[in-house]
Amino acid sequence: MNQKGCPEHKVMALLSNAMRKDTTYEKVLSAMCTRPHPVAVKAHMQFIESNMGDFGLFQGTKELEEKVIKMMGEMLGDKNACGYITTGGTESNIQALRTARNLCNKEHPNVVVPASAHFSFDKIADLLRIEIRKAALDSEFKVDMESAEALIDDNTIALVGIAGSTEFGQIDPVDKLAELALSNNLFLHVDAAFGGFVIPFLGRKYDFDFSVKGVTSITADPHKMGMSTIPAGGLLFREEACLLPLEIDTPYLTIRKQHSLTGTRSGGAVAAAYAIMMHLGMEGYREIVGRCMKMTCRLVEGAKELGVEPLIDPVMNIVALDVPELDEVRKQLRAKGWTTSITRSPRAMRLIIMPHLREDVLELFISDLGAILKKI
């Protein structure tokens, strides 16, 4: 730090130089976040001082959080769901399984998750000292129910289903997992961090949320397809009793108890989530998801014209392409400014069609991919 401060214009110039090194979203096909909607940005800045870690000081922001949770609950099958705005899917998943662990109070707890589960569950194993057992996937990359059932024993405290898997965008048979959970008296958590703001707007009914008896908690992130600012995740429980195992005393704050994992929480993110959900409504989200799905179909069509097949027909706006010479193709795409990613097993090119992508940019990607494939 300098002994004397810098003038504002010099500081802003330094920030601009740093930002020029960041990747802009225009040619990014690997990220599950996107440019936040301008309405969300305005709301975030308006509430930039609010700290939800001590929401007794910020009653208006707390009321907005309650309204966001109610709207998300209605979207996900239960208007009476409770919860709070987290920093994202990782925190939400940690807290859901922390509740499951604290409710069961077993000495050597384990949780059964699909092999497609997000890497946050590996963090959970380390942080909470819970054994994570990974069930096999079927041919369509959904959890194999026989494999999941075989992993359950007397120390199992919870099952996890994925609604919009990170690599394939697949939706596990949550209704079947719920039957298994109920028959074994287990907590069932659904990780819909990505899918929570996609699946309700696909125009097809999927049984994945609180409308399914047996689902205990859901992760869904407004800062992904919800078009809100970062960080804005969401953790919802069917029953308020599930929040109790997370509470600790906060004697020096204006609130008596705190159930969040982080202490300080951004009120700006809460306001942004509220603003964009109110602004877009169900129809607005349906339009956004519809546009992304239209581009997803065009991508698959264009890839097939180049002789490249998807590993599965996309369920949502995530595509896994079986590209030959994958590493070399990705290297050459990167040289042209494209950012892509890969799936773990089987290895494929993973592409996410987010709202920041434009139709003309997608056509350019298909063209560049075709030109590269012709050369290798």
Image (spheres, helix red, strand yellow):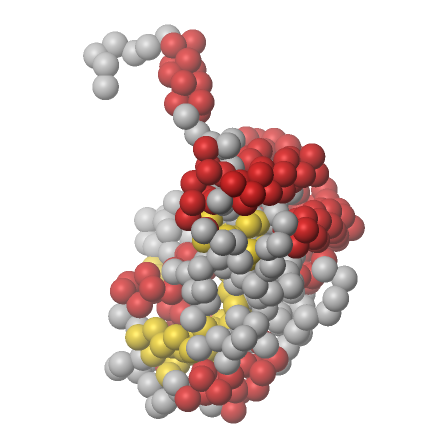
Observer-nearest of 185 and 66: 185
**Numbered circles on residues, count:** 0
Q: Residue at x 44, y 77 (%)?
A: 136
Query: In the rendered view, would you say 1 is above or below 262?
Result: above
Which residue, as the protein is rendered here, is positioned at the far front? 375
Observer-nearest of 376 and 246: 376
Q: Residue at x 73, y 47 (%)?
A: 291
Query: In the rendered view, would you say 172 is above or below 68?
Result: below
Q: Residue at x 52, y 54 (%)?
A: 323
Q: Residue at x 50, y 32 (%)?
A: 336
| Residue 122, image x, y percentages | 33, 64
* Residue 328 appears in the rendering: yes
Q: Please identify the quarter of the rendering in which residue 1 is found.
A: top left
Tell me if 28 is positioned left or right of 93 in this view. Answer: right
| Residue 99, image x, y percentages | 41, 70
| Residue 54, image x, y percentages | 42, 46
Observer-nearest of 264 and 34: 34
Q: Please identify the quarter of the rendering in which residue 40 is found.
A: top right
* Residue 247 appears in the rendering: no
| Residue 240, image x, y percentages | 52, 69
Tell me if 150 is positioned left or right of 191 in this view. Answer: left
Query: In the rendered view, would you say 112 is above or below 334?
Result: below
